[in-house]
Amino acid sequence: MNIPLWFAIAVIGYLGIKLTRVPAWMVAVLLIAGFLLAGSFFSGAIEAGINGGASVLGGSK
């Protein structure tokens, strides 16, 4: 199943606001900061950390 990234982000943002009761401005700032970090030189380190964490949680090495 393929869903657009913008839709997944919108759903996660909506659930974040409704379930955890964080302010909407905080969700917006975190989404914008994540978008900007994805295009920076930090993206390699972020990707390596996410892939490493996923392999630890998934049980593969």
Image (cartoon, helix red, strand yellow):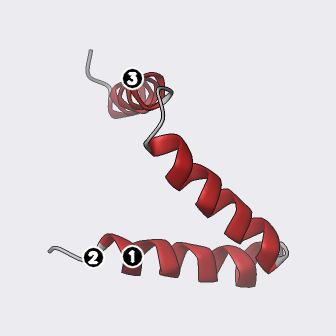
Q: Which residue is mark 3?
A: 48
Residue 59 in the image: x percent, y percent? Answer: 32, 26
Pointer 1 local density, CA inside 10 Å: few below 14, some 14–19, many at least 20? few
Residue name at image x 72 percent, y 62 percent: 29
Label 1–label 2 contact, CB within 8 A: yes
Q: Which residue is mark 2?
A: 4
Pointer 3 local density, CA inside 10 Å: few below 14, some 14–19, many at least 20? few
Q: Quadrant of residue 52?
A: top left
Label 3: which secondary element: helix
Amino acid of disc 2: Pro
Q: Nearer the viewer, mark 1 or mark 3?
A: 1
Q: Earlier in the sequence, mark 1 or mark 3?
A: 1
Does residue 12 sit above or below 50 in this rendering? below
On screen, residue 42 versus residue 56, left or right, reads: right
Q: Dividing the image into 4 quarters, which one contains the N terminus?
A: bottom left
Q: Which residue is mark 1?
A: 6
Label 1: which secondary element: helix
Pointer 2 local density, CA inside 10 Å: few below 14, some 14–19, many at least 20? few
